[in-house]
Structures are given as C-alpha cells and as structure tokens.
Image (spheres, rainbow, N blue to C red):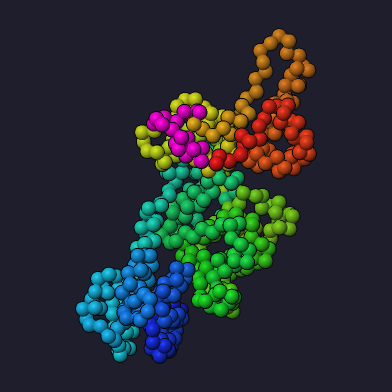
C-alpha cells in the first residue's frame, strides 16, 4: 500500500510520542493530524476525512482509548482504528479488538511491525469503503425500467436517454424544477460504462459562493481560516465515475473558468495548492434555466456551455404528459403508504386536470399531503391540497345558450384567460401578491381588483403548513 497522500490521525496524551509518530509517518509521505485528547479527536472526525486512526488505549482525563474506539465505531466512521498501549496487557488489546479496533501495537513501538499493520489497516479501510459504496448502490439503484411514464413524449425522452447512457460524452439535462432531472442522471450513470464507479451529486445553487470552489475541488491544509486538514473535493471523489452538477447555471463566472479547466484538461487544482490533480469523470449537468440565453446575457461562458452540452436531454414538464400522472400517483402511494391504499376516481381526475407547476416533485408532495390526512385506505379528492383545484380546465367549452353572441364569447374567453393568467402567477409565487403582480407587470392594487373580480383567494396558493 502506497502511504503517500494518506491522512492519519494519531491520538496520544504524550507529546513526545506524538512528535515521534509524526516524524515516522511524514517520512513515508503521510499527512498527520495529532491530538492529545480523545474528545477533540472525535470532534475532528465528525467533519473531516482520514484514512487511518491510531489511538492510545490509556489517556488520563476525559475519554479514554476504549471509549474512543467505541465512539468511532458507533459513528460508523470508515477508517480502521489501530490501538497503542504501553501499560496494558494482551487481554486489554484483545478487548479493544472485540469492540472494533483493527489491531494493536505495544510501546515502545516496533516500527517494522507498525508499517505492516498500517498497510493492512489501510487495505482493509479501502475494502470497507468499496463494500459500503456497493451496498448503497444496490440500495438506491435506479435503472430505466423504474423511470415511470407511458406518454409519447416521455417514451421518446427515455429512449434517447438509454442511447446516451451507452456513451461517455458530457450531457446537459434541461427541464423545469421538479421534473426528474436527477432521476434521469442516476439512471444514465447506472446503465452506462461508468456504472460501477461513484456518482457524486452537487447542487451548485445550494452552496455559498465562497465555499463552492472548496466543495468542488477540495483544499489543502491551511488554505484558508478553518482549513485544519486537507479535504478532497467532489471531483476527486467522482474519479472513475460521474459527477452530477445540478443547477449548473448558478455557478459564478469566476468558478466557471476553473470548471472549464477541469472539463478540458481533466485535472483540478485544490484551493491552496499549485499542483494539478488528474481526475477522470463524466460530467452530467442540469439546469432549469435556458443556458443559451444565459450565454447571450453574458452570465454563462460560451466555451463552457459547449463543453458541457455535447448532447442535451430535455425532460418534458408533467403538464405535457398528463397520461403519466395516474402512474406516478400510484407509484408515490405505494412508496409512502403501501399496496393497500388506492386513489378514487374523483381524486385521480383532479390530479390529471391540474397544471403541476412543481412537476413530479409537487405531485409527490400532494400525495404525501393526502396520505397524512386520510382515515381510510382510499385517497379521496377532499384530501388533496386546495391548490390542485385551482387549475384552469384543459379544454374551454362555451356555455350552451342561444344568446351566446360574439361579444359574450369574447368576454368569456378574455375573462377565462385573465383568470388563468392570475392563477398561474399566484401558483408560481405561492400566493405572494407582490411577486405575482411584478411577474404580471401590474400594480398590487390592480391585482387585488382582479382577484376580487374573479373571486380568487391568494391564500389558497400558499404552501400547506
């Protein structure tokens, strides 16, 4: 086992022994983190990665070595623990192994034996990580047969995704928020040539700009305040697999330059380092915004856009595939309530007639809402969120009357359009009057008058508490 670039945590109350271990391990190319108190070492492990832990069994004051080993195992930390003692017996060391330690060394240390133990422990730690990865992969495995939909548009999208999965080209998945972009990304990864490798997802819009570079590319110890050790970024974790950049349009221009280097040169630079690190991963990006328009508005680099968008997969919104709503609804009922719960006809029709601005994610939310309120194993229309009934019917039919003149028809059509326009704005902004009026290009006072005219209550569009 090559020890270079491995990070080892050494916990011992004797400062002289920590210095001895630091010199020994650093000569082998390791990065060493030393702690004299087990409590502080445990706090460090909660937020940092190390490849191996070495801990003295007997430490005065606070947590001792045995308690430390138990705590590390309880938190399911992936690195192995090697215990050290100059005071105990073989029985004490065996007891430590029984509670989860990998092996033990006695003081004074035989460094030849210690080298063998370190190599074996690192091999074991890597194997455990691999097993954990495979277990998670099996547990959360998503393949194309589980991508649900029967509408013509969705079937076309699914067939294109299956063809794309056989390649390793970079892919841009576009579509509205909640339409299933990450589901497709996972299915494409799992069905592709890199399916045995990791899939690492990062939401570019959910991380503060000043932290995003470190999250993506990692950082070196001392790179900035609080960087107490080296941290591996998402790109390195995705080596050999796929990295999924969700909401890639939210990347600041300063970081787009560095992402372009990662795409073109297949190498990244950790924050605080001058040494490039090679990475080999497929990049799947996703956006709910029009990236071409972002390029035209100088908000997104054109060269990066073409590197990421070798091929584009457009996911249709749920309103354009109403035939899929009953299937998806039934799937979410089984997922959250089991096989015995059914949806009655009125509720099913309401779900199909709704516009679904939040797409599949909103549909799942509506089903969960109904399940939480039901007393019997049947989802009825009255259990659905009120917003589901605010949608404009898909087909307008004029009233059946002989006196339906051209003026009546014009007023009716304009009125229905106006009402639908208001409803869509309120739904997008969850009943917020100020934002809805701004979207519509009218004043709040005008919107209030229109709400009164059409008997619309903005409160009906606010999220359920």
Residue at (37, 59) in percent of width and height: 134
196 over 161 or under it: above or below:
below
Name the one closer to the observer, 162 or 407.
407
Q: Is residue 411 left or right of residue 351?
A: right
The residue shown at (60%, 57%) is: 205
Residue 33's spot in the image, x, y percent? 45, 80
Q: Quadrant of the N terminus?
A: bottom left
Q: In the image, 213: left or right of 380?
A: right
Q: Is residue 406 above or below residue 394?
A: above
Q: Quadrant of the C terminus?
A: top right
Residue 2 in view = no
Q: What percent of the width, then of the height, locates residue 20? A: 40, 90
Write the residue at 46% across / 73% down.
44
Q: Can residue 263 be spotted in the picture?
A: yes
Number of dots carrying numbers: 0
131 or 229: nearer the viewer? 229
Q: Report the residue that reaches farthest toward the left.
A: 91
Could you tell me what secondary structure mostly forms the magenta stretch?
helix
Q: Residue at x 46, y 35 (%)?
A: 373
Query: In the image, residue 63 lies at what x, y percent?
Result: 36, 75
- The answer to whether 12 is drawn above or below residue 131 in the figure is below
Is 145 a magenta residue? Answer: no
Judged left or right of residue 4, residue 209 is right
Residue 8, quarter of picture: bottom left
> Residue 43 in the image: x percent, y percent?
45, 71
In this rendering, position of residue 449 left or right of residue 100: right
Q: Is residue 388 above or below residue 226?
A: above
**What is the residue that sits farthest to the front in this orientation?**
61
Which region of the structure is painted magenta?
Answer: 365-382
Residue 341 picture quarter = top left
């Amino acid at each position: 086992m090559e020890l270079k670039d491995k990070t080892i945590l050494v916990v011992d109350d004797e400062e002289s022994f920590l210095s001895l271990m630091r010199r020994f391990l650093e000569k082998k190319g390791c990065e060493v983190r030393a702690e004299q108190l087990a409590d502080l070492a445990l706090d460090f492990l909660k937020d940092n990665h190390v490849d191996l832990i070495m801990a003295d069994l007997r430490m005065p004051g606070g947590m001792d070595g045995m308690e430390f080993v138990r705590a590390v195992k309880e938190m399911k930390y992936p690195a192995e623990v090697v215990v050290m003692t100059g005071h105990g017996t073989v029985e004490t060391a065996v007891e430590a192994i029984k509670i989860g330690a990998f092996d033990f060394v006695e003081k004074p240390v035989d460094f030849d034996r210690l080298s063998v133990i370190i190599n074996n422990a690192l091999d074991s730690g890597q194997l455990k990580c691999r097993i954990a990865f495979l277990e998670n992969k099996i547990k959360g495995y998503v393949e194309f047969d589980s991508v649900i939909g029967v509408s013509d548009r969705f079937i076309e999208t699914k067939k294109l995704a299956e063809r794309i999965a056989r390649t390793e080209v970079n892919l841009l998945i576009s579509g509205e928020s909640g339409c299933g972009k990450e589901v497709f990304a996972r299915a494409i990864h799992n069905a592709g040539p890199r399916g045995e490798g990791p899939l690492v997802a990062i939401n570019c819009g959910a991380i503060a700009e000043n932290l995003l570079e470190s999250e993506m590319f990692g950082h070196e110890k001392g790179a900035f305040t609080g960087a107490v050790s080296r941290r591996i970024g998402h790109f390195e974790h995705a080596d050999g697999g796929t990295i999924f950049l969700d909401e890639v349009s939210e990347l600041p221009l300063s970081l787009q330059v560095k992402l372009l280097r990662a795409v073109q040169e297949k190498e990244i630079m950790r924050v605080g380092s001058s040494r490039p690190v090679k990475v080999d991963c497929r990049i799947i990006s996703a956006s709910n915004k029009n990236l071409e328009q972002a390029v035209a508005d100088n908000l997104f680099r054109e060269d990066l856009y073409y590197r990421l968008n070798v091929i584009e997969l457009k996911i249709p919104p749920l309103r354009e595939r109403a035939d899929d709503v009953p299937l998806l609804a039934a799937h979410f009922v089984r997922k959250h309530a089991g096989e015995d719960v059914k949806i009655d006809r009125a509720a099913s029709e309401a779900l199909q007639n709704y516009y679904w601005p939040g797409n599949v994610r909103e549909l799942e939310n509506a089903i969960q809402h109904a399940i939480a309120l039901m007393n019997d194993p049947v989802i009825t229309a009255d259990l659905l969120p009120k917003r589901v009934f605010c949608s404009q019917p898909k087909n307008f039919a004029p009233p059946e009357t002989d006196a339906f003149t051209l003026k009546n028809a014009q007023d009716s059509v304009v009125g229905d359009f106006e009402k639908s326009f208001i409803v869509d704005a309120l739904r997008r902004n969850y009943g917020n009057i100020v934002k809805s009026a701004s979207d519509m290009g009218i004043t709040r006072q005008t919107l209030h008058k229109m709400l009164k005219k059409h008997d619309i209550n903005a409160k009906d569009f606010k999220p359920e508490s």
